[in-house]
Amino acid sequence: MANDKVSIHGAWASRWVFILAATGSAVGLGNIWKFPYMTGVYGGGAFVVMYLICIALVGVPIMLAETLIGRRGRQSPVNAMKSLAIEAGASRHWSLAALMGMVAALLILSFYSVVAGWSLEYILGMGSGRFEGISGEGAGAAFGGLTGDPWRLTLWHTLFMFLTALVIARGVVAGLERSLRIMMPLLFVLLLVLLGYSLTTGYFRQGFDFLFHFDPSKVQGGILAAMGHAFFTLSVGVGSIMVYGAYMPKNASIGGTVMAVGLLDTLVALTAGLALFPIVFAAGLEPGAGPGLMFVTLPIAFGNIAFGQVMGLVFFILVAVAAWSSSISMLEPAVAYFVERSGRSRAQVTAVLALLCWVVGMGTVLSFNVGAEAKFFVFGEEGFRLFQWGAEGGKTFFDSIDYLTSRILLPLGGLAFALFAGWVLSREALREELAAKSPLLFNLALWLIRVVAPIGVLVVFVAELSK
């Protein structure tokens, strides 16, 4: 039976807008630093090959599942899964998976806004020349001064959350589509500018070798890392891709479009590594991992090379744009759901949800300074305690939310979406949405969604919980 449903929220003008939106959702802080570093550490080109295999077997099938559920349901993830489950004669409680993903997205946004806000501070710092000639000690002190100041963190957290809400409140076409048509090309241009500059540093070969030396001996230690990053990098498991799929044109090829997003996401990450590591080596520094070092190592590098302040400004604008495009995808599923449920205007719903995320995000703000001694999930000689001030061990508020979302809610959400698409939706519905002309390709996609991807997610889930 043909699917003639239309989303009340609007629709993308073309499949390319969906590609921009989904790529914007996928490309974030992890692409700019974590993936390039993992590539260098876990065998270079060998890791890239292994990662692409994991993307094809785990990341893309789950993105495929989310996209086709979204386009089939043409509603917010919660209502799409509820209505499709009822149509298939299954339990409406499948929608709880989407509800869990929606909550996870809001929780992630609450702390993502704080961390992304750091890039706004560093745009100001680079633009004013504050990091010119800075030492390692000075860069560490600057970052420590930022995270230790709750008022500055609150300012940038507030501004970033406002920018996110501003895009969402304007709607799918006037807000999301128009903004993404500017943000994503800007991101690619800024990345190419940095890449062009890195070619002039004299250390491009060293950066290239760090990324792409083919060392199979290191691959075994990076298999779980590749599988985990292949899952997390595409922003699956929270419903963001599902709600973007709801706005996807009916005649667009889901398979080809999702593959394009996976390849673009990987290309951006590798280009970021090629652009940044020569700059790090040019400054005589060693590359390190983690978003914190993005705000310590690179300011040293940019502060001590020719034209570094200008390139540093370009870099942190790039980081802010990447974070912004990701953050709007985290807010959209909940906004779509509550607009459908309440009948309120998009602007009203956005304001309430953004304020809620802002309030929860204040817990992350305080985790870096005056609330650093507030520890949750404490295991000690006295047994387990949910909360204890000044306890040895335990997790800060930020660490707790990060652990809950990345290691529990996201894998469970991705698993549920794959199982729903593969086993609850009928083969006829899947065949219609995928529009696969080849029976072999259709059966391959079905096998990946039904069997391979769920097994991969379970492996990621167990590996993340054991950390």
Image (cartoon, rainbow, N blue to C red):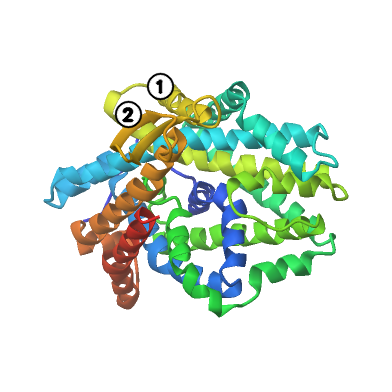
Q: Where is residue 81 shown, x and y percent of the image?
A: 24, 45
Q: Circle 2 — which element?
A: helix
Res. 183 in view: no
Q: Which residue is mark 1?
A: 352
Q: Is 250 or 451 nearer to us in this picture?
A: 451
Q: Where is residue 411 shown, x and y percent of the image?
A: 34, 53
Q: Quadrant of residue 58?
A: bottom left
Q: Where is residue 275 shown, x and y percent of the image?
A: 72, 58
Q: Nearer the viewer, mark 2 or mark 1?
A: 1
The residue shown at (17%, 43%) is: 93
Asked if residue 348 is positioned above or below residue 49 in the image, the reply reads above
- Amino acid at dot 1: Val
Quadrant in the picture for the C terminus: bottom left
**Horizontally, is 395 left or right of 40 in the view?**
left
Q: Residues within 10 Å of mark 2 (few under 14, many from 20)?
A: some
Instruction: Look at the numbered discs 2 and 1 and tell me whether their residues touch, using CB distance below 8 Å.
Output: yes
User: Quick one: label 2 or label 1, which is nearer the N terminus?
Assistant: 2
Q: Residue furthest front?
A: 381
Q: Where is residue 330 shown, x and y percent of the image?
A: 44, 39
The residue shown at (62%, 62%) is: 270
The residue shown at (85%, 64%) is: 202
Task: Kindly report the distance in space between the C-alpha atoms of the residues bearing marks 2 and 1.
Answer: 10 Å
Q: Which residue is mark 2?
A: 338
The residue shown at (80%, 57%) is: 284
Q: Is 292 or 27 nearer to us in this picture?
A: 292
